[in-house]
Amino acid sequence: MSELLKITDLHVEYDTSEETVYAVNGVDLTVGRKETLGLVGETGAGKTTTALSVLRLLPHKIGRISKGSIIYDGEDLLAIKEKVFKKYRGKRISMIFQDPMTSLNPVIPIGKQVAEVIKLHNPDMTKAQIESRVDEMLEMVGIKANRKKDYPNQFSGGMKQRVVIAIALACEPELLIADEPTTALDVTVQAQVLAMMTDLKERLGTSMILITHDLGVVAETCDKVAVMYAGEIVESGTVEDIFGKGNHHPYTIGLFGSLPDLKDDKPRLSPIEGLMPDPTDLPKGCKFHPRCPHCSEKCRTEQPEVMVTNGHSLRCHLFSKEV
Amino acid sequence: MEDNILVTKGLKKYFGTPKGMLHAVDDIDLSIRRGTTLGVVGESGCGKSTLGRTILQLIKPTSGQIIFDGKDVTNLSKSEMAQFRRDAGIIFQDPYASLNPRLTAFELIEEPLIVNKTYKTKQEQQEAVFKMMEINGLPPRLINSYPHELDGGRRQRIGIARTLVLNPKFIVCDEPVSALDVSIQAQILNLLMDLQDARQLSYIFITHDLSVVKHISHEIMVMYMGVCVERAEKNELFANPIHPYTKALLAAIPVPDLSSKGKRREIIKGEVTSPINLKPGCRFAPRCPYACEKCMADENVKLRDLGNDHYVACAVI
């Protein structure tokens, strides 16, 4: 099975006038064709930074990839000239941003915003062809084509997110990066949007990276999962690996323990004590050790290596001893 | 005789808009037993926050009665109102916006005590603040920190401490954990439940997150466009939901395990419509798969008791 995207040992830093923020610290990820990868973690784990690195959209002069490689369809994305990459962005790889309220231009009708991306990547298309493609895209995401002259403020949150999805899929990309696409939506609308995204993905054969903090959304939509903490992937594997019994990273266990369960009644939640480490001053050794209930001397000094068994990888000293 | 901390009767809040009357809260009857939590769930715009604020009279109700601790509090004198404000507090949703950025953690917690002149001496007042910080898991070294120096979880702890320092009997928690990450959310939920046990507090817990509401509440009320569509004890509601909207809401939650993977869920169509100038009858009818003619008359969709303290407002069932 050929991989569509392969990220190896990615390091991203943000330089500010006072300090350096180590946002991503050695991330390895692969996304196969037609596969959905869920990237899970809390605020500040480096999920969005990883996604922005793939699209080369890190803030200019501040964000910098200090190490690592991103191979997309056999090509080194970091080596391509910006001029060439512009033809990829939005066409072969596109992104859905978190907040539909702010990712649309408020003074341009939505039809025009969908047309913009089509026009840019298909310069030969005639006006009529573009217009019919816009209608087709809007209908596909469940918006009547006669509303294309309306402005974003005339739509509800769920409808705006549909417009954003239409824009992202307008050029039938091979890879779609969805950054918390349903976090700002109500549950019933979230269910509609997720069902629609899964349908469209199957129909168009798109691969997807779904960034979220909602483990329920992951269980329903993803094939593979990677759990991020402090810029590292602490555990990854198929959904069955992560949600099944087997061995788990203490952070993954903590994440599940923090969730109130709808099925059985836990009298108390078992949260992870403490806070995420400051990314300007990361702890030595395992980055999770200050919060970990199984922390040993080794964890404080030595960075654990990634252990892989049958595709299920863990970055923890607890499991490295056994092998 | 049940010991209710709060009872509302026919509580209404309408807002006048250029397009007509907006029915934010429409005819809500509820009661909360002392030391328990009533969870209020619903989607954005269903009136749950307005309900919380109307109960506390941060917004004047259009009509209806609010009985707090056996006393009607809808028309209080200034000094009686001050006492009510001490007994009934609120915790706000956004710990980033609800704290004054120019006050330190200590000053923020001290402020309600100064306003209410709770303690006679400065020393008692300071001791009270330190004790409150300890109860809320805020280490004393943070006394001089400003809100921007703290993370969301700690800010929300300050928000809770500010409310709790006046020793209230009843607190409206308006989405207190929705701006927080799951691991921090769990810490705050545990704190709120411990405080309830220790101080016999009663809560109205407003949220859109059904798994959170199930975890913390004793009784749950489901709101849709300003009206209560279903109310029951929590296990009863989750085991035996009756209103089509409650069913749809429960079906829409993504569950973090693999048992439901691949199964197609029933998804309700459409979105919440405008609560301005409403037509008579059931407000959920335009999205409801079971809607029929009976749903178009007001008297059919009144809240009915099905026994077992389970109330539902649906004409079809």
Image (tube, helix red, strand yellow):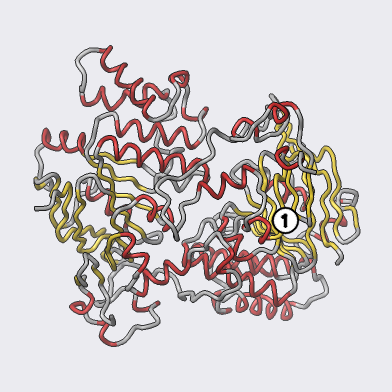
Q: Picture coordinates of residue B55 (x, y %)? A: 22, 49
Q: Quadrant of residue A94?
A: bottom right
Q: Picture coordinates of residue A294 (x, y %)? A: 62, 35
Residue drawn at the location 43% of the way across and 25% of the way down: B102
A117 vs A42, nearest the viewer: A42
Q: Quadrant of residue B231?
A: bottom left
Which residue carries the number 1 mark?
Answer: A237
Q: Picture coordinates of residue B134 (x, y %)? A: 38, 24
Is residue A234 toward the left or the right of residue B221 in the image?
right
Relative to B238, is A260 above or below? above
Relative to B267, is B47 above or below? above
Query: Where the C terminus of chain A falls, by quadrant?
Result: top right
Badge 1 amino acid: Gly
Q: Residue furthest front?
A: A322
Is residue B233 toward the left or the right of residue B238 in the image?
left
Q: Picture coordinates of residue B94 (x, y %)? A: 43, 42
Query: Where the N terminus of chain A falls, by quadrant?
Result: bottom right
Is residue A245 toward the left or the right of residue B78 in the image?
right
Residue drawn at the location 47% of the way across and 29% of the way down: B147
Residue drawn at the location 28% of the way across and 70% of the way down: B277
Q: Residue furthest bottom?
A: B293
For the residue labelled by badge 1, is the local secondary structure a helix, a strand or a loop? strand
Residue drawn at the location 55% of the way across and 59% of the way down: B256
Q: Quadrant of residue A230?
A: top right
Is residue B73 toward the left or the right of residue A103 in the image?
left
- Please tell me how many numbered marks the rendered image carries: 1
What is the chain identity of the residue bearing mark 1? A
B297 vs A68, nearest the viewer: A68
